[in-house]
Each structure stands twice: as structure tokens, then as C-alpha cells.
Amino acid sequence: MSSDATGINSLSIAGKFVVSDVSTPSMDTAERLKLLRETFGFSQRELAKRAGVTNSSISMIEQGQVSPSIQSLTRILAAFPISLSDFFSFDPSHSAQVYRSGDLQLKADKAELKVQVFGALNPQMDARIECLPAGQAFGFNLPGSDVCGLVLEGEAQLMLFGGAERLQAGDAFYIPAKQPYQLSNVSTTECRLFRCSLFVREV
């Protein structure tokens, strides 16, 4: 194992690499970092600048040639709204779904919203109507349980790993647990939307 000036430790095992004491289900660090970087539209050079490391360091990590130390990886992830634990816990194999207006029979009525995706509302469900001003976004979210939502008014952009979806009034979405996403309003008018999920109880 070797270390460069950025604190990145090199460890090659049959073309793969690992980070000590961290579980990496379904994807290794290289694939996760590349997927995260491409989702946010960063070039390797831009990510390196934001993280304060060299461009070659990012390139070598994504190619699986080096393994970053926990300290170095935490510094790189600071360029994104995602923690170290969330970085290793998201499951990109479970894809989100978008349903266009008419695909689902969803009805909003001021104080009450009947959602057929989850069934009747119950005390174990976190259900809310939210307003998102023009040009603003909710924080990057890694849900502990499945989430569904419906755009009531205006437009929203749903950022997912692999790309973004533009949602209009009447469009709905489903996000499986451990799938990072972000909702933003890229229009010039306010967006109102409904989101619901089951409460995650800590054991």
C-alpha cells in the first residue's frame, strides 16, 4: 500500500480496491464516485478543484487504481450534499419511477389528499404538502423508506442518479429506499407538491 500527497492510499486486489472498515454493497467506491460525479454534472477537473485534490487523484480513484483514505474520501464528498455513510449505503440497483399525468388516479382536495400508491393514510406515514419557490431546491435526500409524491401545481425537476426528470402538475414519482434524490424548481413560478413516506423507526 502506498500514499500520495493527497492522502490517497493505493491498494490493488485483482483490479479492484477497498476502503478499510467500510461496507460497499453492490458497487465499489470507484463506481459510486463516478456515478455521483456524473449525476451532478461535474468533470473530474471540477470535482478535484472543489475537493482540493489533484485531477489525477480523482481519475485514479474512478479507474480503481487507488483507494482513498477515509479522510480523503470525506474531503471529496464534501463537494456533494452527501455524507460518507450515505455514500456507501445508497442502492442504485433499485430504480425510481416517474408516472405522467393520467397514469395514476391521484386526487388533491385542499386539506386532504388520497394517494393510491400507498393506500389510505395512517399514523405511521409522514405526509405533507410542500411549497418550493422558483429557483430553489430541497436538500439532497437519502430516504430510509420508500417515498412517493405528486406535483400539484407548477413544475419540478427530480434529480436522480443517471439523470434528471422534469415533472409537471399531475405527474407523480416513486423513490425506493436508499435511492438518493433531489427536488428543485427550475421554473419561474412556485411549485406545490405532495410527498409521503413511512416513518423510519430507529431500533
Image (cartoon, rainbow, N blue to C red):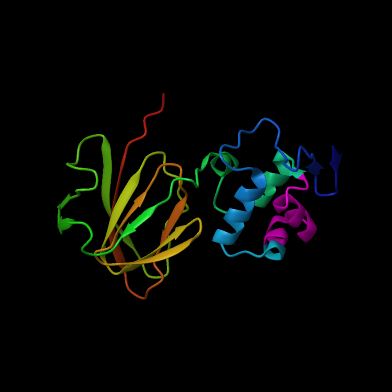
Residue 76, relative to residue 99: is it above or below?
above
Residue 8, relative to residue 109: is it above or below?
above
Question: Left or right of 135: which side holds 59?
Answer: right
**Outermost residue toward the bottom in this view:** 188
The tally of labels here is 0
Residue 5 x %, y %: 85, 49
Residue 168 x %, y %: 30, 68
Residue 55 part of the magenta segment: yes
Q: Quadrant of residue 145?
A: top left
Residue 135 part of the magenta segment: no
Pick the quarter of the image with the N terminus.
Answer: top right
Residue 10 visible in the shown view: yes
Residue 154 x %, y %: 29, 69
Which residue is more in the foreground, 52 or 103? Answer: 103
**Residue at horizontal 59%, vertical 43%?**
27
Residue 99 x %, y %: 29, 59
**Residue at horizontal 50%, vertical 43%?**
91
Pick the quarter of the image with the C terminus.
Answer: top left
Question: Which residues lie in the magenta part?
Answer: 47-66
Decide whether the magenta segment is chiefly helix, strand or loop: helix
